[in-house]
Amino acid sequence: MLLLVWLVLCLVVVFFILLLPWLWQREIYRRYSGSRPVACPENQQPAVVNLDGRYAAETELDGRPAVRLRDCSRWPEREQCDQACLSQALQAEPYTPGDAKKRPKQIYHLPIALAAFAAWCLGAFWHSHFMFRTRWEGAVGLTQVQIKQIVWWLSPHLLTFGVCLLFAYGVAWLLAVCHRKGVLQGVLMSVLLCGALVAASSFGIARMPHDLLVIEAGYTVLATLIVGVIVGGLYNKHLLPSH
């Protein structure tokens, strides 16, 4: 479970360093994309234009996104126009047929809570005296008295459950963004997320004692599969009867 805690902490760091700029660019892309109705300045007739959201997201890194047309219903005949309708396009509401299908799916919290609780229970059993507690004690350098004291503390249990919950939410978020569902897709997203965390924290993992690394790696693999199966299998399903 220590390995999973370390991985999720690295996930938080990677999120703030890498994902936040990506999410901002994605928001810029969404804001400056889509089909929009305009009145063509040349003939005052209705036309439909498409803004170049990708170009706006790329140029936003320079401080202010540059806006240009990607397509127009009057192209290619009038493709060399001066794009004087840009101001209208920016003020118009995007019209994107099938836009509802492209929206991220809703994230259901109950499967996430069940997956996190199952991963936490697995960790409690995995590190108990029935499994690998003796080897784990020797690997971390703690005595049985110290371990018993830690077991009765509330904060370690809350921390480990919070880590499992955060990881489960990460898997659910990937499923929602990629519009996927099902056990296989859940396991795939869970493995991808775990692999990204391992790659981001490989330096710290390599310095762990061998016995501790083996124990935590075994738990992390099983917990990753369990979270993927539960979140993916119960994703977008109504677990409670509606009244």
Image (cartoon, rainbow, N blue to C red):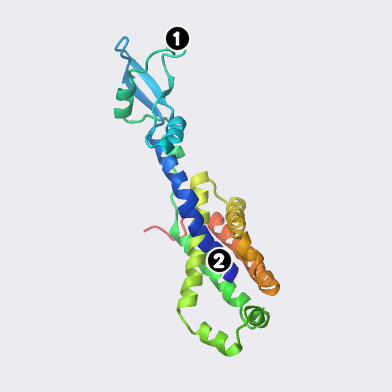
Q: Which residue is drawn at 31% across and 13% down?
A: 45
Q: In the rendered image, which quarter contains the N terminus? A: bottom right
- Amino acid of disc 2: Trp
Q: How crowded is mark 1: few (under 14 residues within 10 Å), some or many (20 or more)?
A: few
Image spot of residue 37 (x, y percent): 34, 23
Q: Give the residue pinned by disc 2.
A: 6
- Amino acid of disc 1: Glu
First of labels 2, 1 by sequence position? 2
Image spot of residue 158 (x, y percent): 46, 73
Q: In the rendered image, which quarter contains the C terminus? A: bottom left
User: Dot 2 lies on which element?
Assistant: helix
Q: Give the residue pinned by disc 1.
A: 77
Q: Residue at x 54, y 67 (%)?
A: 5
Looking at the picture, does residue 91 appear above or below residue 25? Answer: above
Looking at the picture, does residue 125 appear above or below residue 22? Answer: below
Looking at the picture, does residue 45 appear above or below residue 135? Answer: above
Q: How crowded is mark 2: few (under 14 residues within 10 Å), some or many (20 or more)?
A: some
Image spot of residue 136 (x, y percent): 64, 79
- Nearest the eye: 233 or 59: 59
- Disc nearest the viewer among 2 and 1: 2
- Nearest the eye: 179 or 201: 201
Asked if residue 204 lies left or right of residue 156, the reply is right
Between the C-alphas of marks 2 and 1, the distance is: 58 Å
The tally of labels here is 2
